[in-house]
Amino acid sequence: MVRYFIKRVLTLIPVLLAVSFLVFWLMSMTGDPARTIAGDTVTEAQLEQMRETMGLNEPITVRFGRWLSNALLHGDFGKSLYGDDCWKEFALRFPHTLKLAITSILLTIAIAVPFGIVAAVKQNSWVDTLLSSTAILGLSMPTFWMGMLLIVLFSVKLNWLPSGGDNGTILSLLMPMFCSAVNNVALVTRMTRSSMVDQIRADYLRTARAKGVSEKKVLWGHALKNALIPIITTIGTQLSFLIGGTTVIETVFSWPGVGSYTVACIRSNDFMPATCNVVLISTMTAVILIVVDMLYAFVDPRIKARYKRG
Amino acid sequence: MKKIMILLLSTILIFTVCACGNSGNSGAGEAGTEGNYAEWVYSATPGDLDSADPYGSTSARTEWLTNMTFNTLVYYNEETGEVEPELATKWDSNEAKDEWTFWLRDDVYFHNGDHLTAEDVRFTYLHTANLGNEVNVVKTFAAGAYAESVEVLDDYTIKFVLKQPRPDFHMYMEMKVYSKNAIETLGQVDGGVIGTGPYYFDRDNTTSGQIYTVSRFDEYWGGIENYKTKHIGFKVYGDWNGVVAALQSGDIDFTTLQSIHYNTVKNDPNLTIEEKVGCSSYYMGYNYTSKNADMNDVEIRQALAQCINKDDLTIVAWENLAIKSDNFCPPTGVGHLPDVKGVEYNPEQGMKTLQEKGVNNLTIIYTSGAPAIAAEAIQASLSQAGIKVNLRQIDTTNWAAFKAAREGYDLFVDYGSYRGALLYNFNRFLHRNGSVNFGGFVSDEYEALQNNVASQKEWEDMLKEFGVLQQWVAENVPLFPLVYTNQLLGKNINVSGGYLGSSNNSCDWSTICKIEK
């Protein structure tokens, strides 16, 4: 198990190095940071001098090598065009992204798993039809559209909730949390339902029922446990997506997270913080996926045995 | 399974309780009043503050903030067209107009307690003149290259010896002044935000990505009677729609607006709109290296201009919140000549000329928003004249570089904020070495006229020759002025004060206040 974990972590190193270089290289191809910050007021000669001062005239490999060594050896991920420390800016915004991601995924689990189970148990009944239809509606609703409607209703018309930002209260969290959860709830509900339907029909459950095991135990103790693998996979993937920053949600609700900040950096050719954010988010996504893999072992003894064999 | 569900529900409860804790805006926003005025007034910007250093960014956000935190040597009053004292009480030049002396106030202190002297002015001028020498100084100062030397005559007197005579040099000296000591001891990033203005940049109430704040400097040399608000906070929003929703919901008290939001705000009984003729000139530019049409041929430029219906354009792209223009220099611009006659709308004549010249297929580039709508309106106008126009939208990130490359387009729609001394903007847009002369316009006749303006020794003579230049530009259309857009300020009905300038550069929110009910 530990050996498997170490192996997975080691395979991350070349992946993250490749991602770092790719991001650094792509970002440096997107535009000219000197022109971005100088605007329209400077001549070509002045721009050239700025590029020289900013080190933009050096080869990409030299710049990447310096950035990587500073990041690994000193934890220095560079500075933005306006002199802000990239790591500090990331650390300032990441808790907001994390808060939104965790609360949203918990809301998803709390709603979607019971809904999925009920839909599976009441298969082909009106309850199933209602829950499945609601799930399809949730999946097909564009998040930005729903976000704007919520703002108009709850902020502009009713004046109950703040229109944007994170003021540290539950009120400012409600709309973005709900909005980012809607799609996931729909997805996980459908996943839970289909996974549970497969299990409910399985032979081993028929045997259990024949042996007199209560329906409650059959459902919660046996069926759900075996249906969990695809559900965990879906939830893990959605969590890593949310950790990456739901840019649309963050933009619509002016949520001060990493996603909207990264997009703003990309749009302004500020490639140091953009690179830093993407690399750190990639690292976290990879870690989450490893954690999900580890969770499989706790849910399914067969996978645990496979991990033990290495 | 029951245990798992209980665990899940407990976790949700814990997170909910944690989320309710106050971890947000560093104390910004506590309610309170000073007299009948609210202590806090809020605005918002789509995007975060780039820099609180006046020379650290060219963005509007930086301009707004530093107009409150810094004073300038002199102040150009765009209402009267006169230069007024600010940090300098008076100024004078020699007869040749190549030596200018400024006398400073002796009672001005920076936010860190430093006393303002002529050394600070000299330092600021030299520090900002050489763009690129300092990484975080990114904004060039218009008159930075004009002085041969800068002499400190005494603590409160400074002399600029110019490379050539300039009767309008004082108009360029709307220069925000740094504290030399602050920059030398704290460095550019921390020292560059310390000014002498009525407000200081309040780091304690600033949270990156959420809000940036200025707070009143109670030792301000001009007194604080006019500055009723203790803290002015600028909340950071994702886009303009978010900003307008925040204004409507009461989360913020005032903001500048884009024309598309005019009716939304106008129809809200809790809000009011202030309008001002702006100095932002929208224009159609020509690519002088185009292969589809010889833009160096003045008749082609004039013919294209003749085909464009500016009335339609003003309604379609700016919802009538703009004024169609013939003169590139707007009414608020220094030396604006009101009776300049431009190329008139005459599609029949334009079409005839374009057919004769074999112009039939052009590509126009633009960015999103109003320029995109304007480009579509231009396409419609030119289509009626039988010209096929291809539209090509360019992302704002690469806009300047794309234009400068002069490939893949024949026309472009752009705008420029027109503010500054007499020839400053004409220099930038139309001079052969101008920083914004993207189309590559080159004309000996134009250069001669421009030099003629610059070589005048008396201000009145400069103005007269500048009028001649404006008329030449209107007739020869090296670029084709479309409209001057209005500046719009939306605010809560309880909010008053503040100054809506003709451009972002001249807006000053330091006197904004909100009366508490």
Image: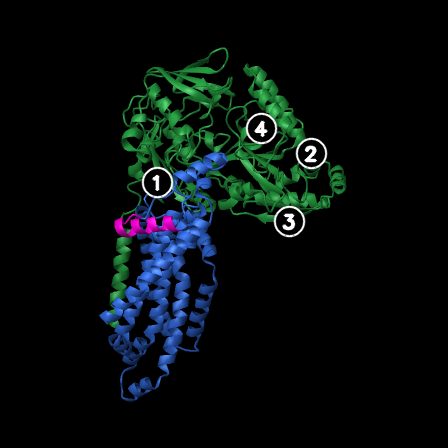
Chain colours: A blue, B green
Which chain contains the residue that carries disc 1?
A
Which image quarter is the C terminus of chain A in? bottom left
Q: Please indicate whether residue B347 sits to the left or right of residue A285 in the image.
A: right
Question: Which is more foreground, mark 3 or mark 4?
Answer: 3
Q: To which chain does the residue with label 4 belong? A: B
Sequence-earlier tag: 3 or 4: 4
Disc 2 chain ID = B
What secondary structure is marked by label 2?
Answer: helix
The amino acid on which the numbered mark 2 sits, given as a three-letter code, is Val
Q: Secondary structure of the magenta portion, mostly?
A: helix
Q: Which residue is mark 3?
A: B390
**Mark 1: amino acid:** Gly
Residue A70 belongs to magenta span: yes
Do residues under tags 1 and 2 come within 8 Å of each other at their CB atoms? Answer: no
Instruction: Give the alpha-carbon distance from disc 2 to disc 4, as whole Å.
Output: 20 Å
Q: What x and y, as percent, mark residue B345?
A: 70, 35
How far is mark 3 from mark 4, CA to CA? 29 Å
Q: Which residue is mark 4?
A: B329
Chain of the residue that carries numbered disc 3 in the rendered image: B
Task: Estimate the spatial distance between the alpha carbons at disc 3 and disc 1, rounded to whole Å.
Answer: 41 Å
**Residue with the mark numbered 1:** A83
The answer to whether residue A253 is visible is no
Q: Considering the numbered disc 1 on the image, is that residue within a helix, a strand or a loop?
A: loop
Task: Give me the C-alpha separation between circle 1 and circle 2.
Answer: 46 Å
Report the Cα–Cα distance between label 2 and label 3. 22 Å
* Residue type indicated by callout 3: Asn
Whether A191 is drawn above or below B70: the answer is below
The amino acid type found where label 4 is placed reads Cys
Residue marked by disc 2: B298
Q: Which residues are magenta?
A: A61-76
Q: Crowding near pointer 3: few (<14 within 10 Å), some, many (20+)?
A: some
